[in-house]
Image (spheres, helix red, strand yellow):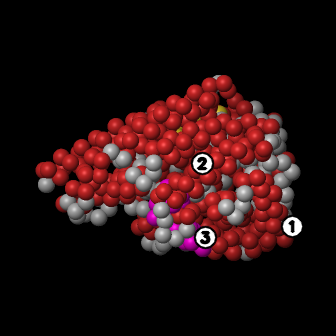
Amino acid sequence: MADHQQIFDQLCDHYRETAKLENISALLGWDERVLLPENAGAYRADQVTLLSGIIHDRNTDPRVGDWLEQLHDSPLTEEANSPAEATIRRLKRDYLKQVKLPKRLVEEFSHSRIIGQQTWVKARAEDKFATFEPILDKLVSLSREMAEAIGYEGEQYDALLDFYEPEAKTAQVRQVLKTLKDQLVPLVAEIKDSGRVPNMEVLKRNYPLAQQEQLGMSAASKIGFDFSAGRLDVTHHPFCTTIGPYDIRITTRYDENFFPSAFFSTLHEAGHGIYEQGLPHQWFGLPPGAAASLGVHESQSRLWENIVGRSYAFWSHFYPEAKKLFPEALSDVPIGDFHFAINEVTPSLIRVEADEATYNLHIIIRFELEQALLSGDLQVKDLPGAWNEKYTQQLGITPTSDADGCLQDVHWSAGLMGYFPTYSLGNIYSAQLIEQAREDLGDLDAMFASGEFMPLLDWLRENVHQLGQCYPGDQLVERVCGDPIDSAPLIRYLRSKLGPLYGIEH
């Protein structure tokens, strides 16, 4: 046992050192998207590329393979899902994947991702897909090459999906999304036929940026984001990144004449940050100190952004503060009108500003398009037309510009093919988790209305955050809720909230 423990300690030390390099790369990535001067982009890509090669060398070090082989059937793996067993299991899984990727491919992909994001910012600002097309074409080609190098049993897309939702399969996700779509479409139709429409003008008044920042930080802090171990900044497309166990960076973007844009993106990213801050710090850099999956990560951001942040109970607590900060905009707006407006359901062009009922339709469109891009059924040059066609068919609206169409998301510019489905999985997981939390904790709405968010946060810490990657995402949620992935709780939640607003059955 002593020898196995010594080997395990060597393995953990190796990966903790590698994590420091990954954190340095993350810091360079954060800086590139928040502060980097325009002309410094090319050199930043070279810096990140160098780091990616060094990290890949460490991840594929033959010693790692030897250590994992010696630990595979050791006493440390006897207790399933224990921190030690999960560390060995997850690291071996990742190692076997990494050794299949040539260093040249890893470096080229890393370099192209940085150039891709820089090019995307320019192309979106100028509304010129042609500017973005060449680098996107390269990223799709490199993604295809990575999928082939890693290998897959079912579909090529499986290899990329696995980076974000380990052990998930495309066919399974496709069925989950189809079931969800079949339930959402009639709900959206009922809402449209209700004839009820909130007064959206109240959200489009003047909301000074400094006060928006103040309210956003106040709310993020209240729900549990620790600003002594994190910070909030401005960027082109909101994100959260981890620089270290006590350094979680979240970002947002402000619109002085549309309140929801910054506030809800701040809550969303704070949800991600709260999860990162709640992971076991003693395991930082190792599987037990990392998020279970991106689907689980999204469950945390969507839970705080929507299920909590768009609830009447939440605004019962925060609306007085909002009215003090925005007296001109909100002095004549009853809380009920405000609550109805922030829960408007209507097809829209922009995913990050989409309502909860139509949001997953945006994800399904992207899921379908990136599979077609990867397979070659859709050429990159034809993406704008294909995007607009799907929006017309599935949401009944057509983008009038690529900036509001296929250029609106940063993900493909960063080579994140396979990422989008995790948003919908996160929505489903969040509804399952909150349903179980209500059963365990009682009247959460009464707690929110009185400004008490810690009971829910403590419950999430115990049942989700502290378990890290000891369980795959879907197994973790099933362990907490007692049921496998199921979209029924999400539909129940949507109907219970939207039913009274729109006068439909709930």
Image height of 500 relative to 383, above or below: below
Residue 243 showing in the rendered view: no
Which of the two discs, 2 and 1, sits closer to the camera? Answer: 2
The foreground one among 110 and 78 is: 110
Q: Is residue 55 left or right of residue 345?
A: left
Residue drawn at point x = 66 percent, y = 53 percent = 310
Residue indicated by mark 3: 174
Residue drawn at point x = 55 percent, y = 68 percent = 155
Which element is circle 1 on? Answer: loop
Q: Amino acid at mark 1?
A: Gly
Residue drawn at point x = 69 percent, y = 75 percent = 182
Residue drawn at point x = 37 percent, y = 45 percent = 59
Which element is circle 2 on? Answer: loop
Which element is circle 3 on? Answer: helix
Instruction: Inspect the magenta stretch and tell me whether residue 382 lies in it.
Output: no
Q: Earlier in the sequence, mark 1 or mark 3?
A: 3
Q: Which mark is residue 415?
A: 2
Q: Which mark is residue 3?
A: none
The kind of secondary structure the magenta stretch mainly shows is: helix
